[in-house]
Image (cartoon, helix red, strand yellow):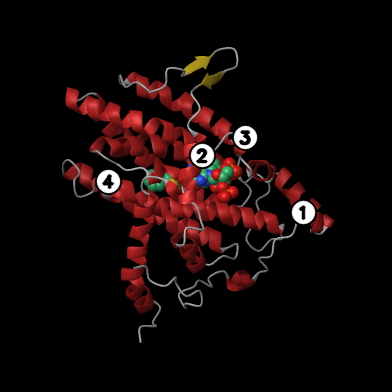
Amino acid sequence: MHPEPVDVENPFQSDMYGNILNIDKNVISLEEEDPIKLREFESRILSGDKIEAKDWMPSLYRKQLIRMIEQHAHSEIIGALPEGTWITRAPGFRRKLALAAKVQDEVGHAQLLYSAAETLGKSRVEMTNDLLSGKSKYSNVFNYPAKTWADVAVIGFLIDGAAIVNQLANSKGSYAPYCRALERICYEESFHLKQGHDNFVYLATGTQQQRDMLQDAVNRWWPHVLTFFGPPEKLSKNSEILMRWKVKMDSNENMRQRFISQYVPKIFEVGITLPDPNLKYNQESGLWEYTEPNWDEFFEVISGNGPCNKERLAVRWWAEDHGGWVRKAISGNIF
Ligand code: BYC
């Protein structure tokens, strides 16, 4: 049985940003915004200026940022789970140590990101409640199981690689607290990438059994890795405004292309193939051609109907239930 959602009046609710949590969260259309303030805001963004938490911003900018940063934070928390299940089964002490440190980092990234989202007026408690109730999304890729040790290598190399492509670009964006968090996260992700690459190469150059295990994991993960960057333009409802306001520094498709061009050669280099007969570089367009991932499946998964969605949320409910006493004790409200 699930416990009751967390009380939003909980004293653990952060007020570290002063009165920022009391800001008006009602979203009004751009036409209703003060045109002078809106023009000034947009020209600041155009000139490359960063927006800080207490600066004026259109309510839609605030809403979009909360949505995106919150989803990112949840992705880090839930993303710790597929790899986390392998800590106790890692082959050898060195791999175990590295994986435990990596998973711990991911949870730390969530902390940074929840704090960045809190600067915009949504409390950590509200965000946790929205994750637990299924209202908030998190990255689709973490709703697939990590079946073998090779899945850990693929996640560490390709999912972390994809994350770096996305986050490095967006760390140059317009909202300063998010950019600061992303910059720190990218430093740590580059260690995760080394860990993933080392593991990937080790398996790719190992015994036939290790190579088969890796190839099988790559075959299963490749389509999901491509979806990590979000749907193509015609299905991407948020991209236009987010790019105009430099929250997203490039389109989903351009990020995907950047990832493919950086990582496909590295995969081929160690003799691993990709499960896509249409994958090829088009010299004329300068773009990679590939088989479109199944976007119907993607939307099903992000609506809560993927292979592991229920299992992932059940773990969070368990943590909520069993960790409540710790939160109460820390907040001094144990009696
Ligand atoms: N998964 O309008 P679009 C990590 C949703 S964790 C789920 O293009 P947007 C790691 C989207 O929310 C790092 N949902 O969206 C951790 C929207 O629905 P709503 C994860 C997705 O926001 C542990 C709808 O589809 N990285 O690296 O403009 C271990 C339409 O899409 C996804 C981030 O979170 C998806 N993949 O662009 C290892 C990066 N894609 O909300 C590794 C930050 C789309 O309107 N986020 N949707 O109902 C972003 O950069 C952007 O949010 C995205 C999507 C590019 C992902």
Q: For label 2, count other residues whose C-alpha is less than 10 Å away and answer few (under 14), some (14-19) or many (20+).
A: many
First in residue order: circle 3 vs circle 1? 1
Q: Residue at x 53, y 27 (%)?
A: 257
First in residue order: circle 3 vs circle 4? 4
Q: Can you tell which quarter of the image residue 26 is in? A: bottom right
Figure check: 288 above or below 90:
above
Q: Which quarter of the image is occupied by the C terminus?
A: bottom left
First in residue order: circle 3 vs circle 2? 2
How far apart, in angstroms, are the residues tagged by discs 4 and 2? 22 Å
Q: Residue at x 26, y 45 (%)?
A: 98
Q: Residue at x 40, y 38 (%)?
A: 159
Question: Which residue is the site of mark 4?
Answer: 99
How far apart, in angstroms, are the residues tagged by discs 3 and 4? 35 Å
How far apart, in angstroms, are the residues tagged by discs 3 and 1? 22 Å
Residue type of the residue flagged with mark 1: Leu
In front: label 3 or label 2 = 3
Q: Position of residue 250 (x, y in %)?
A: 60, 36
Question: Which residue is the site of mark 3?
Answer: 233
Does label 4 point to a residue whose CB lies under 8 Å from ligand 1? no
Figure check: 25 above or below 83:
below
First in residue order: circle 2 vs circle 1? 1
Residue type of the residue flagged with mark 4: Leu
Residue type of the residue flagged with mark 3: Glu
Q: Can you tell which quarter of the image residue 31 is in? A: bottom right
Q: Residue 177 or 242: which is nearer the viewer?
A: 242
Mark 4, secondary structure of its residue? helix
